[in-house]
Amino acid sequence: MAPEYPYYAVIFTSQRTDGDKGYGRMARKMEELASQQEGFLGIESARDSELGITVSYWDSLEAIQKWKDHAAHQVAQEKGRTEWYKNYKVRICKVERDYSFEL
Amino acid sequence: MAPEYPYYAVIFTSQRTDGDKGYGRMARKMEELASQQEGFLGIESARDSELGITVSYWDSLEAIQKWKDHAAHQVAQEKGRTEWYKNYKVRICKVERDYSFEL
């Protein structure tokens, strides 16, 4: 992924409730659906016993808003609040620059 | 943490090489040292078998630059490139807005 500047990142940090309760399946489904949206650039996730962090990348704030409002995603968000998450935080960010290292 | 806007996020995504090689100890030391820097607002990390994501939060781009240039952090960065990481990517971001949910 080598998008032009500026692009945008949505940092989603969360703590899960206990048990899967359909979370894994829905998470995969949402990732697939997100990747089909206009303006989607990529997604990265890591989760350990303490915290989950998912960062998705988008080419505009409009694309982020559209994905937030997507009907199927709205259903998932509601399930997130009632079943899957103890807490979460969403940060909408403008990526000002990036650099990388590879062995 | 309820900082005023704008604040800044550094998204650090990485894949580790095999074995600890002093990484865990240095990671804890760097987190402690970062938290003592002027302009530091917070840090969150998650790592699973695929990927690690660490996001640190700062009150200015100057604070981020100073931490990058910090002598002890420079030593850790060099060890990161020669021993600990297969690859990493750093993204410097301006947080435009955030919102959260708590059960």
Image (spheres, coloured by chain):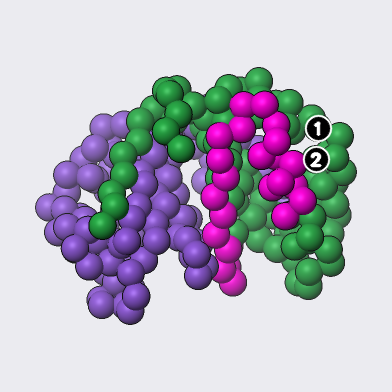
Chain colours: A purple, B green
Could you tell me the amino acid type at mark 2? His
The reply, left or right, for residue B95 in relation to residue B44 is: left
> Quadrant location of residue A84?
bottom left
Say which residue appears at 87% left-offset and 43% top-offset. B75
Relative image position of residue B16 (x, y in whole percent): 70, 63
Q: Is residue B39 magenta?
A: yes
Q: In the rendered image of this protein, does residue B92 appear above or below residue B75?
A: above
Q: CA distance from mark 1 to mark 2?
A: 5 Å
Q: Report whether residue B83 is seen.
A: yes
Q: Indicate whether A82 appears above or below B89.
A: below
Quick one: B102 or A93, which is closer to the camera? B102
Where is mark 1, residue-wise? B70
Residue B61 is left or right of residue B6, and the answer is right
Name above or below for residue A97 compared with residue B26: above
Q: Do labels 1 and 2 touch, CB within 8 Å?
A: yes
Which secondary structure, mark 2? helix
Q: Residue A59: horizontal and vertical position, in percent?
A: 38, 35
| Residue A28 visible in the shown view | no
The residue lying toward the viewer, choosing from A36 and A11, is A11
